């Protein structure tokens, strides 16, 4: 992981255009989800692990891990 000397001088973030759930694995705390994502910047992230707890799913008011991933990544229904 990169260490930033002075992160105040950097702007961060880009939007996620699309994502694909490659694999989901249930564990004691919730789910580990393997994702591929296409970013608005033109880059892609492959093999990204996302951990979603049962508490997270409860907060999103869903038991569906696919819906939970959408909410965790900021894809909310309008």
Image (cartoon, rainbow, N blue to C red):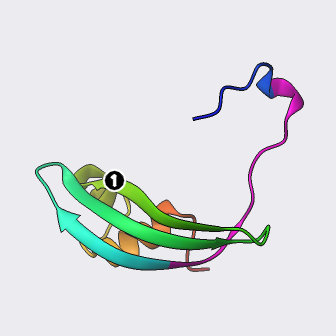
Q: Is residue 78 above or below residue 41?
A: below
Q: Quadrant of the C terminus?
A: bottom right
47 in the magenta segment: no
Task: Please tell me which residue lies in front, 52 or 10.
Answer: 10
Q: Which residues are magenta?
A: 8-19
The answer to which quarter of the image holds residue 5 is top right
Q: Is residue 1 above or below residue 60?
A: above
Q: Is residue 16 above or below residue 27?
A: below
> Circle 1 sits on which residue?
51
x 64%, y 33%: residue: 2
On the picture, is 50 further left or further right than 31? right
Task: Please tell me which residue lies in front, 36 or 67.
Answer: 36
x 21%, y 55%: residue: 30
Residue pushed farthest top? Answer: 5
Across and down, in percent, residue 34 comes to 36, 67
Across and down, in percent, residue 24 comes to 26, 71
x 53%, y 64%: residue: 73
On the picture, is 58 further left or further right than 70? left
Task: Please tell me which residue lies in front, 71 or 15.
Answer: 15
The answer to which quarter of the image holds residue 9 is top right
Across and down, in percent, residue 50 comes to 39, 57
On the picture, is 42 further left or further right than 20? right
């Amino acid at each position: 992981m990169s260490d930033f000397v002075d992160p105040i001088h950097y702007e961060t973030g880009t939007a996620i255009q699309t994502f694909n759930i490659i694999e989901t694995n249930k564990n004691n705390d919730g789910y580990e989800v393997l994702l591929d994502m296409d970013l608005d910047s033109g880059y892609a992230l492959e093999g990204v692990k996302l951990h979603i707890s049962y508490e997270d799913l409860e907060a999103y008011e869903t038991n569906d891990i696919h819906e939970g991933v959408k909410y965790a990544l900021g894809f909310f229904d309008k």
